[in-house]
Image (cartoon, coloured by chain):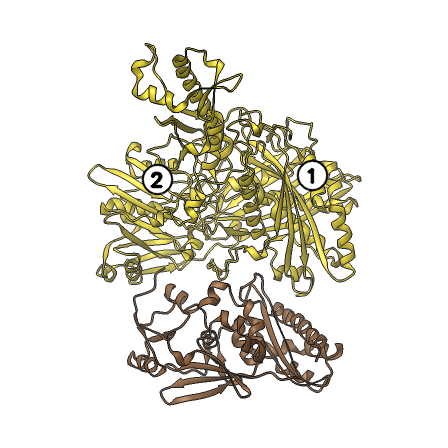
Amino acid sequence: MKARAFNYVRASTVVEALKAFEDAQDDASYIAGGQSLVPTLALRLQAPELLIDIAHIPALRGIELQGDWLRIGALTRHFEVLSDPLIRLHAPLYSEAAPHVAHPAIRNKGTLGGSISHADPASEFPAMTLALGAELEIAGRDGIRRVPADDFFVDLFQTAIEPGELLVAIHVPVVRSGHRWAFHELARRRGDFALVGCGILAEFSGDVVEHVCIAFFSVGSTPLRARQAEEALIGKKLDQVAIAAAQAIVGDDLNPPEDEHTPPAMKRHLARVLLGRLLGEIARQDV
Amino acid sequence: MGVLTPLDRPNSYIGRSVPRPNAKRLLAGRGRYVTDITLPRMLHVAYVRSPYAHARIVSIDAQAARKMPGVRLIATGEDLAKLCTPWVGTMDHFKGMKSPPQLPLPIDKVVWSGQAVVAVVADTRALAEDAAEAVYIEFDELPAVVDIDAARDPSAPVISPELGSNLCFHGKIDTGGVEDIFANAAHVVEEEFHFGRHTAVTMEPRAIIADYDVSEAKLTVHHATQTPYQFQDIYARHYGIPESSVRVIAPDIGGSFGMKLHMYHEDMAVVGLSMMLGRPVKYVADRIESFVSDIHARDHRVRARMAADTDGNILAMDVEDVTGIGAFSAYPRTSVVEGNQVYRLMGAPYTFRNYRADLQVVFQNKVQMSQYRAVGHPVACTVTERLVDMIAEKTAHDVFDIRSRNMIADDAYPCTSPTGYQFEALSHHACLAKVKAMMNYDGLRAEQAELRTKGIHRGIGIATFVEITNPGPAFYGVGGARISSQDGAIVKITPAGDVHCSISVTELGQGTETIIGQIVAEHLGVDRDRIKVMTGDTDTTPYGGATYACRGAGIGGETALQAAKKLKANVLAVAAAILQDEPDRLDVQSGWIVEAGTGQQRIELSEIARIAYFRSDTLPPGTQAQLSVAHHYAPQGYPFAFTNGIQACHLELDVETGLVKILKLWVVEDCGRVINPLLVDEQIRGGVVQGLGAAFFEECVYGDNGQLTNGSLADYLVPMAVEMPDIEIGHVETLTLDTQLGAKGVGEAGTAAASAAALNAINDAMKPFGGTIAQVPMTPARLLKALGHI
């Protein structure tokens, strides 16, 4: 299929982009890497009058350490996430997830900000944004605001970004000593959307779990945290008993939709298996 | 010095791994596929499709669409029915078979979701799609017949009421004695198997340009197909155009696998649209359209049982196959061939004589199902080989031992299968022994036992198979289908001593042109790089059946061989006249006429050609040089050249997640004379990958309302390189004596048994857990169920 005809402008600043959107009376889409948007245009699932190309706005670029936070520009491409040393050092769950994101051709075009603002519940980066406790910098006509990841993912493909607003950067609190993490996903083919995936960031005091964030994807209408499983681990040594307790309750944390290809019972089972494996991996990591 | 082999003779190309001469051109982006062709004044068509699986068409409103920019024509089923006569996908040798008449576009009802209803022709495809959105069709939805059992329920809606039921064909085979054997057998195993629908997903989608020239009343069709003459016949007959005024050109083809030899409604409509407009009209199926209009394959439920004596000697098989084919049988090859091969190939490698089978082919509101690579083979092979493994388990035999105990002995040929297939010569035992050595079977078993203690669960599965190749007229011609079992070649020598060969078999990316070049080079006696092979054009190649059912090498190759020999005799006759020698004292080697005994060069072939063409006055009176020959060949002798082989699959099952890592696959195959080992091995590897796709990934899943629920490449999983194992291939060569070439087909061998070997391997891996599976694809959900996790 061919996309319906649309107009195209290239914005060189955030203000210019916001203005173009406003002028189009909201019948517009921002385009950066286009890896999710273009297929929906080709299938005529979306047909905006105007595409605003934001891929050349310098303010959306760059990866920079700012005190205890790592600022990652929204235009950072997946392949940069995969290879960037600052991300590897300070926001390692993004680096761990990146090899599982699609295939090289897509990673060369797709952007981190695009993935997070698209908020596909089966995507790796939105869930890792939760796991890392990141904050999302959003530009709108009233200026800039920062939204914590926990408040960002609202519903299926819905985020705190209002129509016309633009995700500018992702701010990640840098990992410290005492942090341990693990990522894995179960997928039928390498590069596919996962059947179930999970990233965990845990902070230890000695061998006791002080704080933990368990973020799942492909198990509901948004990426989501397994709060009850987290609760079950806090204050505990990460031994067999604690892991089993978290596994026992994690099914209740998840809300997989009815799907004849992967029924909810299967998703819950796989989530339990995956959680057990990841927590086991964290337990084995040297502090 | 090493030992000399036949390959050390001059011009010895048969048996040599020579690369494809056209590969570089295609890799350089210089291929010319139908999609690449732009003709002057060419228009594009988009189709408005049915959102319902079964519905009456109440009304069609195209008023607004007709006024859209660039729109040249909007045509309905009624418009095209004025030009095109209906077609019926039946063949006479399937007794009692029925199927409703079909038209390019439907007139009063739709019978599957995605069926094209209205054609919108515009200056560009995008404009045509814009206008298609403005066509309003009112449907009255009818209950959809989806499930194969529901289709046969007397209370079910009948999709074509004029046929009386949803049963397309009912076939039975019974050698007698089966009931008694099962009643008294020491061991009986039985299972219900499910084979999902899948589809071809060729790299190049279906594509066609019809160009009707009103001034000469001539039709030229550029068509991505593997069978140009078949479509010449169809277009001529159904549009009432003299056959000689219809030219079908199949340029470069990006894969076909049987998918591109069926009549598709959109393609037939394009011809009519071009006739209505007097302009070329192009249609390219996009990926979403391909999923709901390309043929699907398989879709069988088989209940089968096997009886054996106390020692594990197989005594009999009893089989019931029900297969769903969509709302009609495909044209012109019918949708019964798949089921027919399923129930005739069951148990083919084994010696038992008592067999009973029942085949029911039913209509349903889905995309048409028809021939796809390895037609019927994977179903017959999986059922047979799983039952054999179950007998092995019951009688405590190893999977290799049970097979060597029961397979037809390599020196027992010729013989006949219980279903009447005649085997000239097969090599089951030689293949079995070879694969066992290649895979280090005993080592793998030891490793498996050790890893099981560590919680790692690997499985080993084998599957032996028989493949139908080189079909003669028994396949289609006897059933009344106008599909040639004969092929033809024209070979000519140019004044420079180069060689042109135009031949009716076709190149689909598999290397037909390469092997034809090898055969002509060897048997004419010239260097291969001086031979140009041309295929795929009804105006420039002789009439013939083209490439399907593994006949390109065996039949096309033999045609080329005999043509080359005929031409060589002509060359030698002229050479003898010029050299004042006897033809039988001369030979042609590397483009030279040589002395047969010594190989001493006498005169160059180009010199013969120069004299023949430019200085015929210097030839003895009465000498008319014939440096072009036309030659046809159709198989006689055995109706089919059966091949055989065995596949072995080694894999690791994650018993907690149901995910599978395929570790390795081995194939030992006997396709007779191997013309080009490189191409044969790649044919097998490609086939294996398609078989593994069916085993683990590919399935067209329908909802209860007859909607395809995974019709995109995001949801329909094709096997990818990362998931595919190394595939190691060995050969046994048992030549067919029906031809001078001795080659049989090989294109379907890989697909025939890969899913069976994989299914046996999975069941082997699951053995410690007691679960079993008899369904493909073996998805994680199904495996988790078999393992009792969900």
Circle nearer the N terminus (1, 2): 2
Q: Which residue is mark 2?
A: B249
Q: Based on the displayed image, in which of its 4 quarters is residue B427 positioned? A: top right
Identify the chain of the residue marked 1, using the numbered disc in the image: B
Q: Quadrant of the N terminus of chain B?
A: top right
The residue closer to the viewer here, B51 or B438, is B438
What amino acid type is highlighted by mark number 2? Ile
User: Left or right of B615: which side holds B584?
Assistant: right
Identify the chain of the residue marked 2, using the numbered disc in the image: B
Q: Tell me if I can see residue B240 in this picture.
A: yes
Most distant residue in the bottom direction: A142
Q: CA distance from mark 1 to mark 2?
A: 44 Å
Element at label 1: helix
Q: Based on the displayed image, in which of its 4 quarters is residue B400 positioned? A: top right
Do discs 1 and 2 share a chain? Answer: yes
Residue B774 position within the rendered picture, expressed as x and y whole percent measured from the top left: 64, 52
At x 43%, y 37%, the residue is B506
Q: Which mark is residue B434?
A: 1
**Visual hue assigned to chain B:** yellow
Residue A200 position within the rendered picture, expressed as x and y whole percent measured from the top left: 62, 78
At x 34%, y 33%, the residue is B540
Q: Which chain is brown?
A: A
